[in-house]
Amino acid sequence: MYAARTALRKSGSALSAAAYAKRTKVTLPDLDWDFGALEPHISGKINELHYTKHHQTYVNGLNSALEQFHELSARVDQDSRVAAQLTALQQNIKFHGGGYRNHCLFWKNLAPASQGGGEPPTGALARQIETQFGSLEKLQALTNGKLAGIQGSGWAFLVKNTDNGGQLELVQTYNQDTVSGPYVPLLAIDAWEHAYYLQYQNRKADYFSAIWNVINWKEAARRFDAA
Ligand SMILES: [Fe+2]
């Protein structure tokens, strides 16, 4: 078995890496609505480009980085430079992995009015918002403040902190940095220019205000209850 594995590694590490990568490729998630379904709050053209071009770029980038990772991992014992290459690759995995994951969250936590978009949360999440923030409107204002404070590109997340008794927190990140560990994302809001510029140009505050009309609080409540 060892000999066979070694022979395979020596003769065809690229082949084995390709086979492994084939099993681990990510793809764009299905959307629950048509591109134009979030109008007038987010235009159909923005959604189309955001999904088919931008999110697809992160899908491709993550698959490529993982393929390189598996290929390099298969021969890390043969050359110490490979360890350095693996280390350098971490940034691509972080960027594209975050982009892939953040956008998956984003699409799912948006919905047209016909599917409940914009309807205030109910149940345990609604009570937690009331307890911590006083009202949904105050939470939205705080979130908009976080979004407006992003210098450049980033995200704002409403999370449940499972290390802190299930408290809600607002977390702002840059680039495609995502949340993990005790932070369970309930909402992920994209503050990159590609998410609004075609429709809102420099008026990004208008985009941040408008997006609450299509926030899928049912999905946020489901994530809150499941965490
Ligand atoms: Fe985006």
Image (cartoon, rainbow, N blue to C red):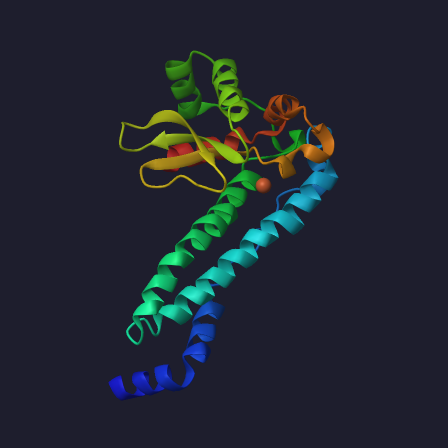
> Residue 157: x, y in percent?
46, 32
Q: Residue furthest top?
A: 134
Q: Quadrant of residue 32?
A: top right
> Residue 126: x, y in percent?
44, 21
> Residue 195: x, y in percent?
63, 36
Pick whichever, 94 or 113, lies toward us: 94
Q: Residue at x 71, y 29 (%)?
A: 201
Q: Residue at x 59, y 53 (%)?
A: 57
> In the drawing, does residue 218 fall left or right of residue 127?
right
- Residue 165 visible: yes
Quarter of the image with the N terminus in it = bottom left
> Residue 10: x, y in percent?
36, 84
Pick whichever, 27 or 114, lies toward us: 27
Q: Residue at x 27, y 88 (%)?
A: 3
> In the drawing, does residue 146 fall left or right of residue 200?
left
- Residue 34 visible: no
Q: Is residue 30 above or below residue 140?
A: below
Query: Which of the four quarters of the rendered structure image does ligand 1 lie in?
Result: top right
Q: Quadrant of residue 153?
A: top right
Quarter of the image with the C terminus in it = top left
Q: Total number of numbered labels? A: 0
